[in-house]
Amino acid sequence: ETGVTQTPRHLVMGMTNKKSLKCEQHLGHNAMYWYKQSAKKPLELMFVYNFKEQTENNSVPSRFSPECPNSSHLFLHLHTLQPEDSALYLCASSQVQGAYNEQFFGPGTRLTVL
Amino acid sequence: AQSVTQLDSQVPVFEEAPVELRCNYSSSVSVYLFWYVQYPNQGLQLLLKYLSGSTLVKGINGFEAEFNKSQTSFHLRKPSVHISDTAEYFCAVSGLYGGSQGNLIFGKGTKLSVKP
């Protein structure tokens, strides 16, 4: 595997389910990001981890819970979601968190909440 | 805080025609500027970036962009497009200073549709 991978690629869940999204980067980076991409809206930054420490929580509802066990893996735990949470969730990584560092994106997980 | 405006949500063009995708930003601090491309069912890929120096930036796949500080713009251009350029293009800005340094602020995207 190369670059940034995300699993699953598609997920359908009910509002009472608990599920997790997984992201893995094979680039030796130290910063990882979760974004939400909804139709007709700009990409929204959700969380940032830099050297495994959470540095950004962009006012995300508590039904989204991130976890970064090491610099290569990032999870997004989902619990009692709402239909408006349906979106494409993108993971990205960069060498470190910083304005000049290129972010590399995974293909995303398409989430549908019924 | 920074914001990005992409003035066109959709741009249809014929193959081999030139194209310009417009991007304007607002920021109270100096910024870095980026263009990303997203092909169907894929993540975002960096096309080009402006960090400093020459205001004309060349990227991959024959794209270029010009940073205009006085007009706070960073328009993306290609002199001759191909069918394979059909994708969604995102302009993004990152502030150099202050809180949330390094975080990308994206525009809503422009869908480029190249017709034969």
Image (cartoon, rainbow, N blue to C red):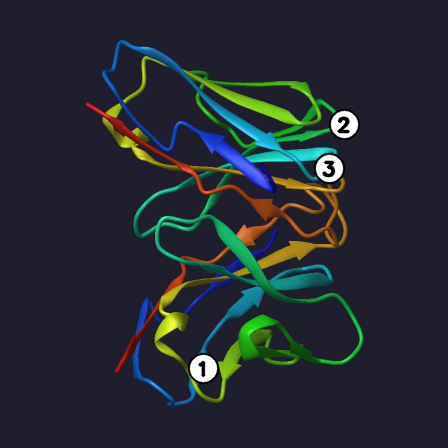
Task: Measuring from the top left, give residue B12's x and y in whole percent.
Answer: 28, 78
Which element type, helix, strand or loop, lies under badge 2? loop
Residue designated by label 2:
A51
* Pointer 1 chain: B
Is B80 or A57 nearer to us in this picture?
A: B80
Alpha-carbon neighbours of circle 2 within 10 Å: few (<14), some, or many (≥20)?
Answer: some
Which residue matches tag 1? B20
Badge 3: chain ID: A
Name the residue rendered at 50%, 52% in the picture. Answer: B44
Q: Which residue is mark 3?
A: A29
Instruction: Answer few, some or many: residues within 10 Å of disc 1's Cα (few below 14, many 20 plus, some between 14 and 19).
Output: some
Label 1 close to label 2 by CB (< 8 Å) = no
> Where B98 sits versus A109, above or below?
below
Q: Spatial distance from mark 1 to mark 2, Cα to Cα?
A: 39 Å
Q: Is residue B72 left or right of residue A79?
A: right
What's the amino acid at mark 1? Glu
